[in-house]
């Protein structure tokens, strides 16, 4: 995601989507086994980005844990890729909005590793949270010229992405099963698809594909660059989310497929929708898309391509706001590490 606080400032839709599972996180914090003193309780936050959407859920989880043991030391490990900009998170944590404010014996730290691998020692984790992250793939297994979004692919084109998504999900579950104490819990919210494979973002990504093609046609974007661009996500169906749970060592306590409507969040009925919505779209797409510009381009050229893309996309969104605004489908899961 874009750093320097840009993603945090323009990720209201992600927070709205994650609210679907806030109550489950509190319930889990009231239920998970607590370690004997002086071992701290460990909360894992998987995919923190700039941290703006993590502060409130972590505060609620800490308060629920403290209602059970007022003196328990609590560690919160925020994890994300090594190249993530953790600076905005650190700034939030030391400010008045940060969950350490007014709460003693709370120790936040970060882990710069992929969540599709080991993050903690075995049996060390008590409670895990992931907010709008697990639909991202570890890598895009291939690209499809003219397409940038897996939900717009044919069945044959989508097959490598489906396989990678299954491998990633199983790897995530295997590592968390190893790290969680028996009876520990995960509360997860991520992009999803309806059983018919619609994600609610097809309109926006159709416009994106059209705008990229227009840039190639105008000579602004090179055809070889365009062919490398792909949004590396897979929005699993409910069945795909549930399939490996039991064999991976988890009990499914609750799950729900819900939706959040960007037409409401960003008010698609009012003038200026595109100006409000473009920063959100830019926050989630600029790095995945434009890191693939050729290495011989100067910084000025790279900026010109990027600006031309978002200016043209804004015009398309302004012309048809309802088609541009996503109705993101999200899957919420509450999982318990089996004690069997």
Image (cartoon, rainbow, N blue to C red):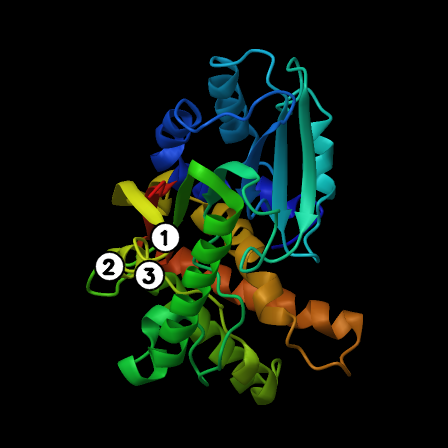
Point out the tag, 1 or 2, that comes first from the N-terminus. 2
Q: Residue at x 37, y 26 (%)?
A: 27
* Proximity of marks 3 and 1: CB atoms separated by less than 8 Å: no
Q: Residues within 10 Å of mark 2 (few under 14, many from 20)?
A: few
Expressed as whole percent of the image width and height from the top left, the position of residue 118 reads 59, 55
Q: Residues within 10 Å of mark 3 (few under 14, many from 20)?
A: many
**What residue would you read off at disc 3?**
236
Could you say where residue 85 lies in the image, as x and y percent from the top left? 71, 50
Give whichever of discs 3 and 1 has the lower sequence position. Answer: 3
Is 295 placed above or below 280 here?
Answer: below
Q: For the residues carrying marks 3 and 1, which lies nearer the camera in this image?
A: 3
| Secondary element at tag 3 | loop
In three-dimensional space, the C-alpha distance between marks 2 and 3, rounded to whole angstroms, equals 8 Å
Quadrant of the image for the C terminus? top left
Tell me whether the residue at label 1 lies in contact with that at label 2, contact meaning CB atoms closer than 8 angstroms.
no
Q: Is residue 190 visible?
A: yes
Quarter of the view holding residue 198: bottom left
Looking at the image, which is closer to me, 149 or 77?
77
Res. 199 in view: no
The quarter of the image holding the N terminus is bottom right
Observer-side mark, 1 or 2, equals 2
Q: What residue is rendered at 29% in x and 80% in y?
A: 154
In the displayed structure, 116 sits above or below 142; it is above
**Picture coordinates of residue 80 (x, y %)?**
62, 51
Mark 3–mark 1 distance (CA, rounded to whole Å): 20 Å
Label 1: element kind: loop
User: Badge 1 is on which residue?
Assistant: 325
Near-viewer residue (305 or 285): 285
Crowd around label 1: few <14 · some 14–19 · many ≥20 (10 Å) = many
Give the residue number, with chain letter if any, for mark 2: 239
């Amino acid at each position: 995601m874009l750093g320097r606080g840009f993603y945090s400032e323009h990720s209201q839709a992600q927070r709205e989507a994650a609210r679907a599972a806030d109550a489950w996180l509190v319930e889990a914090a009231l239920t998970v086994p607590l370690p004997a003193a002086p071992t701290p309780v460990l909360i894992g936050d998987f995919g923190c980005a700039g941290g703006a959407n993590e502060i409130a859920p972590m505060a609620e989880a800490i308060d629920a844990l403290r209602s059970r043991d007022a003196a328990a030391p609590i560690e919160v490990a925020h994890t994300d890729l090594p190249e993530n900009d953790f600076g905005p998170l650190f700034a939030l944590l030391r400010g008045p909005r940060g969950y350490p404010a007014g709460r003693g014996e709370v120790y936040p730290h970060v882990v710069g590793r992929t969540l599709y691998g080991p993050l903690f020692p075995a049996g060390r984790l008590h409670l895990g949270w992931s907010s709008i992250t697990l639909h991202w793939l570890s890598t895009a297994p291939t690209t499809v010229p003219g397409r940038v979004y897996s939900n717009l692919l044919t069945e044959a084109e989508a097959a490598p992405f489906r396989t990678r998504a299954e491998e990633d999900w199983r790897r995530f579950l295997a590592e968390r099963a190893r790290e969680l104490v028996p009876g520990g819990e995960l509360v997860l919210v991520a992009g999803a698809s309806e059983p018919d494979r619609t994600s609610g973002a097809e309109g926006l990504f159709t416009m994106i594909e059209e705008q990229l093609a227009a840039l190639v046609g105008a000579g602004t974007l090179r055809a070889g660059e365009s062919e490398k661009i792909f949004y590396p996500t897979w929005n699993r169906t409910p069945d795909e989310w549930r399939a490996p749970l039991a064999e991976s060592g988890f009990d499914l306590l609750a799950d729900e497929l819900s939706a959040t409507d960007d037409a409401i969040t960003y008010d698609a009925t009012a003038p200026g929708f595109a100006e409000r919505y473009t920063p959100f779209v830019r926050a989630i797409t600029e790095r995945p898309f434009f890191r693939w510009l050729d290495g011989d381009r100067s910084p000025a050229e790279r900026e010109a391509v990027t600006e031309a893309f978002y200016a043209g996309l804004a015009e398309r969104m302004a012309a048809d706001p309802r088609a541009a605004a996503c109705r993101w489908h999200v899957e919420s899961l509450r999982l318990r590490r089996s004690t069997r």
